[in-house]
Image (cartoon, rainbow, N blue to C red):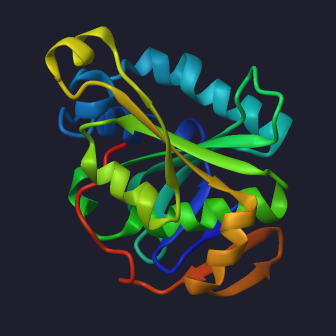
Amino acid sequence: MILETARLRLRPVSGSDVDALVRLDGDPEVMRYVSGGAPTPQEVIEGWVLPRAEAERRAHRTGMWTALDRDAGHFRGWFALRTPRHSYHPEVELSYRLAREVWGRGLATEAAHALLDMAFRELGTERVFASTMAANIASRRVMEKIGMRLSAIHLCDEDILFGSGSGEVEYELLHNHWETTTMSWCHARTPIGRSQRLVTEPGRHAFGDLTA
């Protein structure tokens, strides 16, 4: 399924995206709260990331979407919905990663709204959750902007002892809460053949850098 927002086109990730994904994960700032700045090896992307995304797509209609400019077609990052392997509840995990040059433009919020719409309307999930490092304030703001609420804080031993800020936080959005807030940002949703188009109002959700 292809999703479109006011500024982005989200299509399922493919082998043609390997070079762009390697470049994205090669930026230490992008990976700061993911791996401490370490890059993701190309063999991991080819041998694990892409196959996992394809398996998710086939089994659950979830997976990973490449984010491209609607007009110029430039690679901007990726967004994902993943089904937890050992969950007995209808829930999916939202994640995203954007190139540093587009941080601060509100693109993560814009695309995340489209994926929430898909998750609740098309997949029938009851809960969408997302997690990040506690110190990743920008990513936490994305979660808050799309209506998520803090649901859990996971602290490692180091953080408990020294207050290092390395703990993890989890945010969630439940279907019933989403229903009461969705019309405040979505003003049009029009099917386009086999694609799904969700248009949001550009600029309404702009804020700081996004890495998640």
Determine whether, in the image, residue 103 is placed left or right of residue 197. Answer: left
Residue 180 in percent (x, y) is at 68, 76
Q: Give the vertical position of 38 relative to 116 (above or below).
A: above
Determine whether, in the image, residue 109 is placed left or right of residue 200. Answer: left
Foreground residue among 202 and 43: 202
Residue 172 in percent (x, y) is at 58, 48
Q: Give the vertical position of 48 relative to 151 (above or below).
A: above
Residue 42 in percent (x, y) is at 40, 21
Where residue 169 sits, quadrant-wise, is top left
Give the residue at the far front of this rendering.
161
Q: Is residue 149 visible?
A: yes
Where residue 123 sits, quadrant-wise, is bottom right
Task: Identify the image quadrant of the C terminus.
Answer: top left
Give the residue at the far bottom of this rendering.
187
Residue at figure coordinates x 44%, y 77% from the top left = 71
Q: Give the vertical position of 113 relative to 42 (above or below).
A: below
